[in-house]
Image: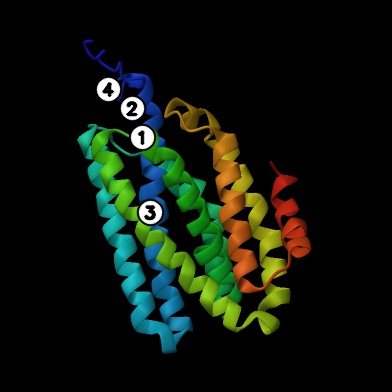
Amino acid sequence: MPQLEAVPAIDFQSETYKDAYSRINAIVIEGEQEAYENYIALSELLPNHKDELVNLSKMENRHKKGFQACGRNLEVTPDMDFAREYFARLHGNFQKAAAEGKVVTCLLIQSLIIECFAIAAYNIYIPVADPFARKITEGVVKDEYSHLNFGEEWLKAHFEESKDELEEANKENLPIVWQMLNQVEDDARTLEMEKEALVEDFMIAYGEALSNIGFNTRDIMRMSAYGLRAA
């Protein structure tokens, strides 16, 4: 019996797809750029871990170049102005915390919120990506777990003295994630990435990270609710 040709569900060359991709691609490029800068800042705040954090920053820079190549492959110019505005609040909160020497807040924003956000988005994107971007993104996801792990391990080792600041930083920054998801819901759907799946994957990754650090289930549910109120 002859095999039927699979009909591609997504037209990667359509103007609608490319328009949405110009913003989504810009977001991942900017996200990796900010992660690069954030890990450099953390390396100054945590001199005992400088080499490891500088290595993480270099990894983020490689990811950025990979995602820039994904845009070029589809002949799409990323909308970087949109992406910088998109990250402005998280970026500002990280910068403020770094200036105040608040390592715990910086780690929550970068190593937990941003890394879990990235892991969720990349895992949802991989099955619907064009072949070039799929290969790049699969490699990136493997690296992101090691970045998440650094924050988890440091915060776990300093849990008791970090707990109050973690809760406060969560309260301030988690709602921003939901506003960010809402902002790109239509573009993500054009790329066949459903918001509900993104939310679910993020909540699972973020909840597991909080659990690994030392929070109990009740704490995690309470902390996660700050985000859901803004969804």
Dot in front, 4 or 3 = 3
- The type of residue carrying mark 3 is Val
Q: CA distance from mark 1 to mark 2?
A: 6 Å
Dot in front, 1 or 4 = 4
Q: Which quadrant of the structure image shows residue 72?
A: top left
Q: Choose the circle earlier in sequence order: 1 or 4.
A: 4
Q: CA distance from mark 4 to mark 3?
A: 25 Å
Residue 230: where, in percent of width, then height?
71, 44
Q: Is residue 44 above or below residue 147?
A: below
Residue on which the image places disc 1: 22
Residue 135: where, in percent of width, then height?
26, 44
- The type of residue carrying mark 2 is Lys
- The type of residue carrying mark 4 is Gln
Residue on which the image places disc 3: 141
- Secondary element at image label 3: helix
- Secondary element at image label 1: helix
Residue 4: where, in percent of width, then height?
26, 12
Residue on which the image places disc 2: 18
User: Can you say which quadrant of the picture contains the C terminus?
Assistant: top right
Q: CA distance from mark 2 to mark 3?
A: 23 Å
Residue at 23% over, 39% down: 132
Mark 1 closeness class: few <14, some 14–19, many ≥20 residues within 10 Å = many
| Residue 13 tag number | 4
Residue closest to the eye, 163 or 28: 163
Residue at 25% over, 15% down: 5
User: Can you say which quadrant of the picture contains the N terminus?
Assistant: top left
Residue at 35% over, 70% down: 56
Dot in front, 3 or 1 = 3
Q: Is residue 100 above or below residue 176?
A: below
Mark 3 closeness class: few <14, some 14–19, many ≥20 residues within 10 Å = some
Q: Residue furthest bottom?
A: 48
Residue 131: where, in percent of width, then height?
25, 35
